[in-house]
Amino acid sequence: MSRTVAFGRDVLSAPDVDIEDLLACLSPSEVGAILEELASDPDDKHVPASVRNSYRCEKDPTGRLDRRSLITHIRNDALASPDIEEEVEFEAGMKRGKVFLPVLSTEEEEEQRKQAEIAEKVKLDPEEEEALAAASLEDVMALADILNTNPQNFIMEAYSDPLQFYEPDPPNTTDLREVMERLAEDDKEMKDVNLNNIPGIEEREVCDLFDTLRKNTSLTKLSVVNCEITDFAVSTLCLAIEENSSLKSLNLEGNKISPDSIALLFESLAESKSNLLEVRVAGQVQEKMGHRVEARIAEAVARNPRLLKIGIKFEFKAVMNRVCQTLIRNCDKTRLRKKEGLPEEQEDEDKKETEKVEKEWTQARNMD
């Protein structure tokens, strides 16, 4: 039917009819039905969901909606309702009703015929078929390895390695108070402190722990991973590192340290006489540090001739390349110093020489 013809009449050439006269001929219920049909649009996001369909509930509300009681009622009603008994008992393998037969095209029938011919050609002897049927998965894979073929050619189903269970690590039972007391007393036997994954450490306790490093001359390795360390504790650590010369390795991964505090930590290491060789600060809550902070870290690492290893994730390749070159240079200088038997006091002279040779680094510019 044409768009301009309705009920056998040409709409475009029909005389104009007043819409008011047409509505006057309808009853209020018919007018309401027309409005509901026109207003209901399931894709209209500007109206409430209850108005997007033509159904209108005319029942009075029984009260406020209680979702938990409604779900409980539905569950209890389902459990109380008796199961519908089956008129015909279920039998495994029994097909009832009309059996579905797929309608194949000519190409699909030709493909099935080729597959049947291939299967007929590669059919094994009854003894071989029986041996393969009784073989385990390991036997089939060993046979495929001998024949230098894919095991999937013999096994017509997906397989996977058995799931291996790894027992979780035992909880860390280190006594934090005892550790702080021994560090404060400068115990010569305490060389390595591991406080990883100890829950419930307060910020005051972490600050007290870092403050004991000021006068400690025995500790060489400190690991405080996943202990929710904050910026305030890191500022205390920066002040303590300036007076500590025995610590060689520091691990603060998996905490809540901000990027600016990480940059401040590296700057403190560059300006102080700390002998830290390894620093790990990856896996913080805020992983993206931005170019400004990463440039600060690279500048601080370039001014530190003692740092050999860093555990951190950089976003910009230019910053990462600069840090890698600095660490390689520090490793080479350390190797040559040990080879020649030079004392470690010469590091200050190396630092001054590095500051003289180091050129001002700027980010590469893009040509527009």
Image (cartoon, grey):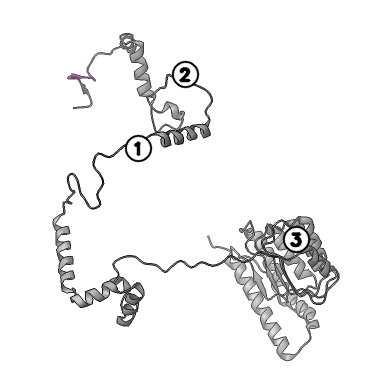
Q: Amino acid at mark 2?
A: Asp
Vertical position of residue 8 compared to residue 196: above or below? above
Tell me if mark 3 has few (under 14), some (14-19) or many (20+) residues whose alpha carbon lies within 10 angstroms of its own. many
Q: Which mark is residue 176?
A: none
Q: Amino acid at mark 1?
A: Asp
Q: Is residue 15 magenta?
A: no
Q: Nearer the viewer, residue 93 or 63?
A: 93
Q: Nearer the viewer, residue 315 or 283?
A: 283
Q: Nearer the viewer, residue 175 or 5?
A: 175
Q: Which mark is residue 234?
A: 3
Question: Based on the displayed image, in which of its 4 quarters is residue 196 positioned?
Answer: bottom right
Whole-angstrom CA distance, mark 3 to mark 1, is 65 Å
The stretch in magenta equals: 7-14
Say whether disc 3 or disc 2 marks the residue closer to the N-terminus. 2
Where residue 173 appears, as percent x and y from the top left, is 71, 65
Say whether disc 3 or disc 1 marks the residue closer to the N-terminus. 1
Q: Secondary structure at mark 3?
A: helix
Q: Amino acid at mark 3?
A: Val
Mark 1, residue position: 83
Where residue 199 appears, as percent x and y from the top left, is 69, 58
Total count of labels: 3
Question: Based on the displayed image, in which of its 4 quarters is residue 184 positioned?
Answer: bottom right
Q: Which mark is residue 60?
A: 2
